[in-house]
Image: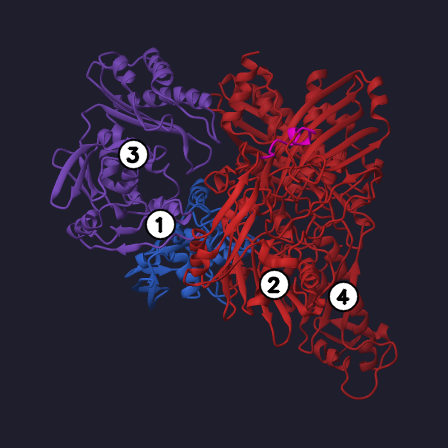
Chain colours: A red, B blue, C purple
Amino acid sequence: MTGKYFGNPIKRLEDKQLLTGNAKYIDDIEVPGQLHAAFLRSDFAHARILKIDVSEALKRPGVVAVYTAEDFGDFWKPGPLQVPPPTAIPGSKFNARTLVPIAKDKIRYSGEVLAVVIAESRYIAEDAFDDIIVDVESLPAVVDLEKAWEDSSVLVHDDLPSNMAALVTQEVGNYEEAKKKADVVVARRMLIEHVAGAAMENRGFLASWDDQNQVMTIWANTQSPLTVRGSVSRALGLAESQVHVITPAIGGGFGPKVMTSLTDDVLLPWISKQLKRPIKWVEDRRENFLATTSERDQVHHCEIALKKDGTILGFKDVFYHNTGAYDSYGMTVPLNTQTHIISNYRVPNFYTQIRMVFTNQMVVTPVRGAGRSEGVFAMERMLDFAAKEMGLSPIEIRRKNLLRADELPLATGITGQDFVKNTLDSGDYLGNFEKCLQAIEYDKFIKETQPKAQKEGKRLGIGVVAFTEGTAVGPYEGCKVTVSTSGKVTMTTGYSSQGQAHYTVFAQIIADQLNVKVEDVKVITGDTNHFAWGAGTFASRGATLVGTAALLASQKVRAKIFSTASKALGVPEDQVELGEGSVSIKGKPDSAIPLGTLAAMANPMRGVIEPGVEPGLEATAYYGPPHGSTGCGAMGVILSIDEETCKPVLEKMVIVDDCGTMINPLIVDGQLQGGISMGIGNTLYERLVYDENGQLLTASFMDYLMPLATDMPKKLEIIHNHAESSLKLNPLGIKGVGEAGAIPPGPAIVQAIEDAFADKGVEILETNLSPSSIYGYLKKVEHK
Amino acid sequence: MKKLFPITVTVNGKVYERQVEARLLLSDFLRHDLGLLGTHVGCEHGICGACTILFDGEAVRSCLIFAVQANGHEIRTVESLGTPENLHPLQQSFTDKHALQCGFCTPGFLMTLVPFLEENPTPTEDEIREAIDGNICRCTGYEKIVEAVHDAAEKMSQKK
Amino acid sequence: MKPVNFDYYAPSSVDEALDTLAELGYDGKVLAGGQSLIAAMNFRMARPSALVDLNNVAELSYIKPTADGGLAIGTMTRVSTVEHNQDVIQRFPLLVEVAKFIAHPQIRRRGTFGGAIAHADPAGQLPSISMVMNMQALIKGKGTERWVAAPDLIIGPFMTVIEPNEMLAELVIKPHPPRTGAKYVQVSRQSGGYAQSAVASIVTLDENEICKDVHMVLMSVAEVPILSEKAREILIGNKPSKDAIEAVAEAASTSEIDPASDLHASADYRRSITRVLIVRSLTEAFERAKRGGK
């Protein structure tokens, strides 16, 4: 469907405030009387706390209070599970060891909070760190995932028999039987490196207790304001109505800002209530690297069993997943990995086991891509290895096994992150792949471009992969749409916004339904006093869930407009015409009543409204899909590589994507481009590195390399290939697109690097490649 | 007693007289002492570029200068460009081309690019990419920022 | 990440600055562009108790041609000023070539030429370049003045012979003889990032295409920048043939450097690319020498 606004590249309504420095982010919020918090963080990754002496810190001028775990008394307790355990999967084991707000007795990762300093300024609060004496008994750190799994490992949580956080096995068909029938079985161990979300804005939290009205007001740049409201009210014994969470402008989310029950959201409201002063904490970049959640970090042991023509008979993947020191966010990431391993191809027999393991590292929660990248990487790589082993081209093996459009919808039998059996709903996987081959000019590259370059002494490589993006999972989101007496429309939702253009795309949907100007629709996100139901911003679900709720709510309002107008104009509803901003009798423009006036009529000050009629031109709606919707696509990359320095240059990239109907193609392209830059960063630049003592060696942008403008491909082509089948999914035919771009660059780039060195037989078994590591791979084959 | 240093600094054409601690970063001074909140702080070690401002007309990191060093100098921040009602041509191109998403890094990009376009009114794509290599954007992948700079360059040179 | 407090002095003349430094002794630290120092202070890794800010000392910021055809550069001259100065472009294009690799434009506009050299970061470009160009450093103290050649100035990672009560005031670069060419090459993971290895060569040919002189510095492959002796041994007095250059690359990359492994590169990789970069640097430097330095 397209409307006046829906489907069109409308310029963003939120831009002007952002461009002029007027938008207020968390650190821009100032409350009179506010104090500043700073967190003293542990230098040790694993240690027993013997004593923390803060007495000197309290003497420092400007320091108001200093707290350690002991000071919180009974208020100190491990936090809730933010995501429940995977009980929907039979036989699954899950050991909940949830985040503690501040370390007590034992330190479990470097960066864990030991003391909270409250001072007149952040400068003074940091000064006080020098005054605090921390006495600990250092313990060996648990860092390596596979070693951590072994029974002989040092324990992160002493009360558990091992470092097993979870063990989840899922199987469809019978892999071992399939393996017996296979002509070829290929097995590999692969690493998927640890990366950061690295939003440009760090986290922040401001708690302000109003003692007179007994209300806690909180500003937080969270992806999940309603979770924060729930946890704060539970912890402090307040009604939810006494806790008001406001999300200001947020400088990017990418996953980690979804995490709650951290030091800030647990302890600062309590401290604000104690001191009766507003308390503000703004994370710095070092803290963000050390302690804000991060992702990837898996070790996969894969096996693929095939017939000699390349048909997949079965796939087995036992993988270790690092959850860090705690597992409050459940198993979203590894479950996404399980579903995405087989989300593109026909895999009749599939065995997959998650070994989620505790380590002395920061907590792992979703980061854009969120387990999908890992699953797609594992499958795509294994296909490449199998193709090589069998003398097939990487294209042939994919063509043979990619799901055909008429095979969808397909129930894979694997339970996903939403605890619903995964359904691959729609799309033309093979069509995406073929379109990508054409756009990257695959045949020409193989026949002409690459051999010509080789003659000139230049190495070029090509990689083409398929991907899917599971999006738009439940449970639900909602919104309220109101026509004001001024004629302006407001939409409120509990969903929070980190730059995804919600203020524009939701307005587009509503403006079409109510026939108002898009700029007359004001969208308010993530303010719990405006709208108090919903789950949060994650899993590329905003456009689908909130967008559909916006459609449903505005359709209800539209119906109210017609019924109210019918009475006001004294004609049947089918004689009412909804013009731009007004209603009138069909063919009688003189009868027009402005929408605002109609809104006033819908809320009469005297008289009686009819039974069953709700006042106002206002309606609330919710939407929850029966299952998530799966975006899909393909990516091709051509790169050149300097054989002597091993530095790759991305010459061209093509992404073919099916995200269903686009509300706004400008925004979709922006999401894809941003995702791709993150995928490139994850593959060639970014990497979180812990040493054997559990020290993070990459706690700054000097060592954690973010992709820059000159790191992007010289040419980047986006092709939208929206299958008609997508339209049946939900009323607007929308799938998510927030993470699509981040998923395929890894396997595509790695395949292209291997291709550039095809004559040497290089085989790459990890996601993150520096020129130095590529050099290492070359040396390995030379020495063979 | 903490020692304070008197400074006189011109910011966006307005003269401010303040007393500051030696260690106060210029970024914090602009944001919290003067309330000019459009300058953002992303790393405080000079890599991300979000805090880029003009110091005597030159784009520099305000997190790597102390406020006390701004004494007698002229500073421009994003607030000196356009207003929501009347955007600077570069700001207009940024919204026209969807060159921002979360908007946090955007003021730093703008303050880097304003003097760049004055010095180099018809930049090539490579020149644009080099010019913004000291600014990190996590949202856009830079593609649309490059487009916006081309667009602004074109519009601004037509005006002249 | 907020710095520890410190006392602050902003002298407006060299004499005043030297008086202040003399008074402060070990407590004082010179603040030049601050692009490394302030970042380190924000991390609280550097905690100077007093800073003597030279940014108001106008007399330390200049690029003056010297009578012999060289240049004298005041310590507080911004790197971007050096990068765009016509005399530098004419006389020492190597400096312009190097400057473009130093961090990003915003850092170069604030960072200073002398500050970068005095910081003696083994991964910084300018300390290495000062050595290969054999810059003469003027070090001033209260009532004292001494000249030190750059190779003697830098004595360790982040260590120079400059005393706490002294400062680097000026760097003088002598003109190149005719038929001199220079070339800087580096490998870094990203633009503006630290180099995993870098090589700068300055070579002079005689009228018979024989190598008269060669200076080559190897950067980021040992604790301090290495001035290659092998290059001089192998090339001076000989034709700079492809084989001779390969021989230098082989000898220097195997015996003169001691690269470390870090997050971004293994020692093996550093050694390997150093070899490659030596060939690239010398080959182009000799080509430029043949063309009279262009």
Mark-to-mark CA distance, 4 and 1: 50 Å
Mark-to-mark CA distance, 4 and 2: 40 Å
The image's mark for residue A685 is none
Q: Quadrant of the C terminus of chain A?
A: top right
Q: Residues within 10 Å of mark 1 (few under 14, many from 20)?
A: few
Q: Position of residue A298 (x, y in %)?
A: 66, 33
> Looking at the image, which is closer to me, A549 or B119?
A549
**Element carrying mark 2:** helix
What residue would you read off at disc 1?
B119
Mark-to-mark CA distance, 2 and 1: 53 Å
Please report, as a chain letter, where disc 3 is located: C
Q: Amino acid at mark 3?
A: Pro
Mark-to-mark CA distance, 4 and 3: 66 Å
Q: Position of residue A774 (x, y in %)?
A: 53, 24
A271 over A313 or under it: above or below: below
4 vs 1, front mark: 4
What residue would you read off at disc 3?
C127
Q: Residues within 10 Å of mark 2 (few under 14, many from 20)?
A: many
What residue would you read off at disc 2?
A270
Judged left or right of residue B40, residue A365 is: right
3 vs 2, front mark: 2
Please report, as a chain letter, where disc 1 is located: B
Q: Earlier in the sequence, mark 4 or mark 2?
A: 2
In the image, the segment drawn in magenta is A141-152
Please report, as a chain letter, where disc 4 is located: A
2 vs 1, front mark: 2
Q: Are marks 4 and 2 in contact (CB under 8 Å)?
A: no
